[in-house]
């Protein structure tokens, strides 16, 4: 059995060796250049190796904020978006300890500069249905010219009520289109201590206009709860942003 030995300057070795059993001769042709960070080697089945992007989800960042540390910007992430991915999956479990605010929202910003708060049009809405109630289906419409992507609502006002679910964010870095960043959510709205039986299943969506966003797209994300307007009236940064706590995890997706 043949081996290749690579000796480090400290005397330790890295060894490459053949498989324990080998039914026939095998040739593996290495690529002529290194891949980019995070890529893996792939074979074409004929021994030719190339560096390729990994498919599926790649973990990027997470926050777990306890109720004692709740703040309006507690679930803000800097520099989580890049040209590496065009889609992102966000898992969230967000609460407001005070019971103020009624709508789950997302905001986007440039690197480390907080969320966009002016001259950025968003529009969207949601469909929701109450679990166990045949007549409890409805829809809501949301708009903002201050970059507030309103997604799901409405909470009942109990302390520690909130939203649990996941969101798909498409192309925040303006990599592959000029149609605008899109947020789509599926979540369970859950109330606090007084009305735990009143739970709603919701599908929310919101689209932002790329014509007014910073050059190169967004790098930051903030999730929170605000006082929204389900009738479609404009919601600005003067809205009542609630203090929030909970858990958020962000993954980049390669298709």
Image (cartoon, grey):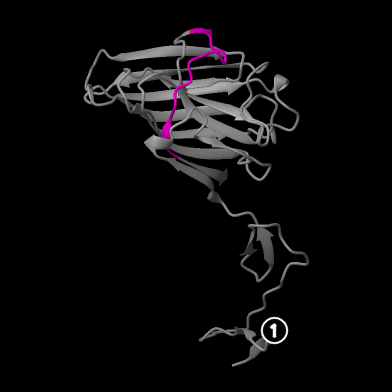
Q: Residue at x 61, y 13 (%)?
A: 145
Give 39 or 191, whichever is nearer the viewer.
191
Residue 101 vs 34, above or below: the answer is above
- Is residue 190 something one can see in this rendering? yes
Image side of residue 93 versus residue 20, left or right: left
- Is residue 170 something one can see in this rendering? no
Find residue 209 and report its image quarter: top right
Q: Which residues are magenta?
A: 232-247
Q: Residue at x 70, y 57 (%)?
A: 36
Give 194 or 120, whichever is nearer the viewer.
194
Asked if residue 238 is among those painted magenta in the image, a careful observer would answer yes
Find residue 149 and report its image quarter: top right
Residue 72 position within the rendered picture, expressed as x and y whole percent measured from the top left = 49, 27
Q: Residue at x 65, y 18 (%)?
A: 120
Residue 97 position within the rendered picture, expressed as x and y whole percent measured from the top left = 36, 28
Give 254 or 58, whichever is nearer the viewer.
58
Q: Main secondary structure of the magenta part?
A: loop
Quadrant of the frame with the N terminus: bottom right
Q: Residue furthest bottom?
A: 1
Find residue 81 and report its image quarter: top right
Asked if residue 132 is among those painted magenta in the image, a careful observer would answer no
Q: Which residue matches tag 1?
A: 8
């Amino acid at each position: 059995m043949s081996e290749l030995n690579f000796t480090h300057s400290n005397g330790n070795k890295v060894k490459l060796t053949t498989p324990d059993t080998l039914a026939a001769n095998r040739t593996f042709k290495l690529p002529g250049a290194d891949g980019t960070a995070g890529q893996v080697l792939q074979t074409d089945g004929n021994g030719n190796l190339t560096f390729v992007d990994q498919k599926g989800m790649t973990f990027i960042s997470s926050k777990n904020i306890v109720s004692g540390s709740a703040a309006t910007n507690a679930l803000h992430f800097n520099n989580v978006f890049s040209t590496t991915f065009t889609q992102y999956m966000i898992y969230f479990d967000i609460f407001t300890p005070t019971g103020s605010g009624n709508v789950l929202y997302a905001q986007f910003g440039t690197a480390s500069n907080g969320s966009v708060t002016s001259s950025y049009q968003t529009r969207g809405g949601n469909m929701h249905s109450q679990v166990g109630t045949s007549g409890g289906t409805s829809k809501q419409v949301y708009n903002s010219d201050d970059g507030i992507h309103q997604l799901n609502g409405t909470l009942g006002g109990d302390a520690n009520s909130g939203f649990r679910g996941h969101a798909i964010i498409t192309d925040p870095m303006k990599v592959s289109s000029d149609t605008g960043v899109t947020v789509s959510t599926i979540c369970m709205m859950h109330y606090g201590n007084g009305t735990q039986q009143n739970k709603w299943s919701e599908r929310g969506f919101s689209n932002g206009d790329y014509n007014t966003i910073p050059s190169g797209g967004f790098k930051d994300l903030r999730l929170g709860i605000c006082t929204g307007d389900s009738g479609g009236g404009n919601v600005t940064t003067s809205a009542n942003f609630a203090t929030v706590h909970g858990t958020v995890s962000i993954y980049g997706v390669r298709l």
